[in-house]
Amino acid sequence: MNADKLRGRRALAVAADSLSQQCPNCAQPLEVSSAVMLLLARNGEKSIFNNDCRFCLGCDVVVLDADYIQEIAQHGLPTARSFTVAGFVDLAAIPESQKNTPLGQNGNPIPFVEFASFEWRDSKSSSK
């Protein structure tokens, strides 16, 4: 995915049963597109996962499935008590020479595009 499409996005995590085809911010259509994201736990654990995101065509909002994020956190960050969704991982920024090196290891940093802001819109997730 084009890094320019990822930059400056305000992320809203919404319960799966509340996901719609319209932006909760401006009511414009949402475009579903797969993106790689980074979860960071306060204890230092990290988890990288792929997710179908809903990008607003009218503003800077990206809508995420809060239930799916919770599920990923339970499996990918098993000892974490709290975590945040830090942003998108920009796979295109990985040098060709590092494509086969695990992200975050052996001098291969995780190239991520931080969200402008992140908000849980699901009361079950708000404590994270």
Image (spheres, rainbow, N blue to C red):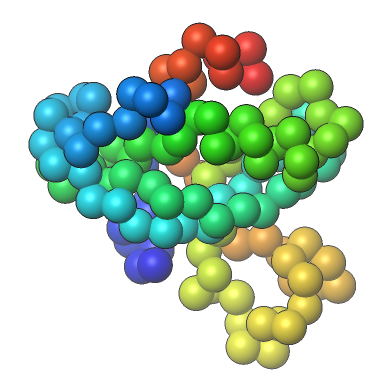
Compare residues 108 and 122 and report the one nearer the observer.
122
Residue 74: x and y in percent read 74, 34
Compare residues 49 and 102 and report the one nearer the observer.
49
Residue 5: x and y in percent read 31, 58
Question: In the displayed structure, would residue 99 be above or below residue 66?
Answer: below
The quarter holding residue 78 reads top right
Quadrant the C terminus occupies: top right
Q: Residue drawn 88% across and 31% down?
A: 79
Q: Residue drawn 65% across and 35% down?
A: 71
Question: In the displayed structure, would residue 69 be above or below residue 125?
Answer: below
Residue 81 seen anywhere in this rendered image of the structure: yes
Q: Residue drawn 11% across and 36% down?
A: 28
Residue 84: x and y in percent read 63, 31
Q: How many marks?
A: 0
Quadrant the N terminus occupies: bottom left
Is residue 27 found left or right of 11 in the rendered image? Answer: left
